[in-house]
Amino acid sequence: MSELDSRILQTIIETAHDHFFVVDADGRVRDVSPGAAAVYGMSREDLCRTTVQQLEAQGVLKPSISLEVIRTGRPAQLMQVTGTGRRVVAQAHPVFQAGRLAAVVSRSMDLTDLQLLQEEYALLQRRFSEHLRRGGGAEEAGLEAELGELEVRSGVMREVAMLLKRVAPTDATVLMLGESGVGKTAFARQLHRWSARREGPFIDVNCGAIPESLFESEMFGYRHGAFSGAAPGGKAGLLEQAEGGTLFLDEIGELPLAMQTKLLKVIQDGSVTRLGDTRPRRVDFRLVVATNQDLARGVEEGRFRLDLYYRLNVIPVTLPPLRERREDIPGLVERQLKRLNARYGRDKLMGHDVWQELMGRDWPGNVRELENWLERAWLSAGDDVIRGEPAPAGSRPGPVIPSQQQAATGGEASAGLEEGESLKAALARTERAILSELCAELPSTYALADRLGISQPSVVRKLRRHGLRIGRDA
């Protein structure tokens, strides 16, 4: 190595934000970055006078990732607990010379830094939302006409839509976060329609739906003869099919680690190599990913690469669950009803008495659950008025609330609003009445959750909110 190359390498090690270790094949520490001393509790000079075997035995490294690479000869990623009590994510890679392991280069990231980065992102999002509320009047006024099939009425979802509209002209990677069924795919499609790539393809890939054995060939493509049964002439993978458009990777947290490494290389290099090929091919697409998982925890547990996490977490956008934006429910219902009427060739209407149930549910499956519920209710309606889906055979009848009792006895049906009462107050009152009666009937919060079709933690929160207690707690 020339003197210049040596100085360049030394500058990289000394100025890197990550903490580097360079270890010989026998475990002797050759060099570490200066910042490692604060994390591992030893000076740079002391670290360079020892071995990773000794550091592991002393509890400085728990465990040593370099020893794992020396043992297996393969790259590794794991969580470490240092002698100073810090938790770090460590990655290590083997260096071969003449076919033999010559050294191991590892780097670690203090999770304190990761937490600070997440807090910084959250702060930026809050500031951006405040900016939209203060100065987005003119822009928001034209938003309604550009939303297409999206139903956005709540303030929080309008902020999400405006954020996406502003970042759409760029090629910045967008990470969509939120529970299953909140509409991440629909918003990704709208982002594509707003972008300069709208004339290109929108390739939607569910990373959890492709078997791991087929993932590489489906995602990266293959050349003729790459494996038994390969199509003559080979096949372009999904990455190539997204050329000039948007690649949407849903459930990115389900991506196998080996594929995470390959995806990171594509993002960094802008090229893809088909399975069985040696010639890289240039690719140009906008990357949008989505997950309902906590990727930061996946990094901590070694299920997700830290460097890929940084690459993806450029513009994080959180879509709140439906229970936190009930103002969107009427628009979503109207949209789905229009679809169902067109699909089945009828013109059914929503009965006014069903809105109480629609607005009062928690919808743990979010928009997807709401749409499925409406389709069942549509199909089960005997006439052109939808009054709700039938209860499953053998299920117990729910508690009767005053408005239902009035209708059942022949009185005029009402929406349940009292004089001067708001919709929010009426829903809360109705919810409390239902919960109070079920608390007297059912033996546990789990039984109550099963009866209501919601999660047990949701039941506990609702009981606490209304000051209710079940007869015999689970």
Image (cartoon, rainbow, N blue to C red):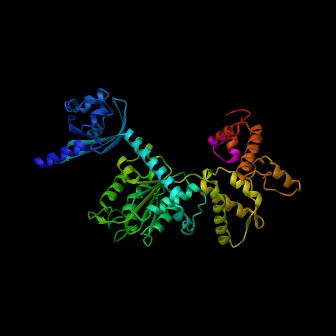
| Residue at screen point 80% across, 51% down | 418
* Dominant secondary structure (helix, strand or loop) of the stretch shown in magenta: helix
Residue 139 in the image: state x and y as whole percent: 51, 64
Is 457 inside the magenta-drawn segment? Answer: yes
Depicted 294 relative to depicted 30: above or below:
below
Q: Tell me if 38 is positioned left or right of 198 in this view.
A: left
| Residue at the farthest left position | 2
| Residue at screen point 10% across, 47% down | 3
Q: Residue 173 appears in which quarter of the rendering?
A: bottom left
Depicted 70 relative to depicted 1: above or below:
above
Q: Which residues are magenta?
A: 450-459
User: Which quarter of the rendering shows the C terminus?
Assistant: top right
Q: Residue 436 appears in which quarter of the rendering?
A: top right
Residues 3 and 297: in front is 3
Residue 64 in the image: state x and y as whole percent: 30, 35
Q: Tell me if 443 is positioned left or right of 82 in this view.
A: right
Residue 100 in the image: state x and y as whole percent: 19, 45
Is 289 inside the magenta-drawn segment? Answer: no
| Residue at screen point 76% across, 60% down | 352
Residue 36 in the image: state x and y as whole percent: 28, 36
Depicted 200 relative to depicted 427: above or below:
below
